[in-house]
Image (cartoon, grey):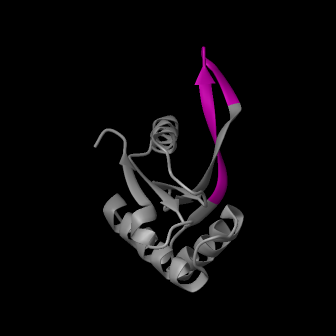
């Protein structure tokens, strides 16, 4: 599967989860349900993956934790916030660079229409 196919499957799963649960739950709930939904679709999912930071040649294992990495290609960052700010997209771009991935999805479930809560972020495409 290529990144666009994976992203499409993730977006479709997010629509299904949002239709079933709606907005207002904790991010951890959406993460658990998204993990379940993506695995139902036979996708490989890793949760809370530590991505190290290399600083001055030293590998620091506590760089950040990706909410979900799907098929070892797409980073999915989940939010349940009143508003997504530009810094959230910048953070995801930084995560993509550190993890050497090309595509990420920022999904905010705390919206009336899930299409308004999904942003695609790319690194060197």
Q: Is residue 56 left or right of residue 87?
A: right
Q: Quadrant of residue 6?
A: bottom left
Q: Position of residue 30 (x, y in %)?
A: 63, 69
Q: Residue furthest bottom?
A: 20
Q: Position of residue 16 (x, y in %)?
A: 49, 82
Give the dominant element type of the magenta stretch: helix, strand or loop: strand
Query: Which of the pair 1/7 is nearer the observer?
Result: 7
Vertical side of 34 occupied by 74: above or below: above
Query: Which of the pair 26/3 is nearer the observer?
Result: 26
Residue 48 is covered by the magenta coloring? yes
Residue at x 60% of width, y 25% of height: 54
Residue at x 64% of width, y 75% of height: 33
Q: Position of residue 93 (x, y in %)?
A: 45, 40
Q: Residue furthest left?
A: 125
Residue at x 70% of width, y 64% of height: 28
Q: Is residue 47 left or right of residue 116?
A: right
Residue 49 is covered by the magenta coloring? yes
Vertical side of 14 occupied by 21: above or below: below
Whether residue 73 is visible here, answered yes or no, is no
Q: How many marks?
A: 0
Whether residue 98 is visible here, answered yes or no, is yes
């Amino acid at each position: 599967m290529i990144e666009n196919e994976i992203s499409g499957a993730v977006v479709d799963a997010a629509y299904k989860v949002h239709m079933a649960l709606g907005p207002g739950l904790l991010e951890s709930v959406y993460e658990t349900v998204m993990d379940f939904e993506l695995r139902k679709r036979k996708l490989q999912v890793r949760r809370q993956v530590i991505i190290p930071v290399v600083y001055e040649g030293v590998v620091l294992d506590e760089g950040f934790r990706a909410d979900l990495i799907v098929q070892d290609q797409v980073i999915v960052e989940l939010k349940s916030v009143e508003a997504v700010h530009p810094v959230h997209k910048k953070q995801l771009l930084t995560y993509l660079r550190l993890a050497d991935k090309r595509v990420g999805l920022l999904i905010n479930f705390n919206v009336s229409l899930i299409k308004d809560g999904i942003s695609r972020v790319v690194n060197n495409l």
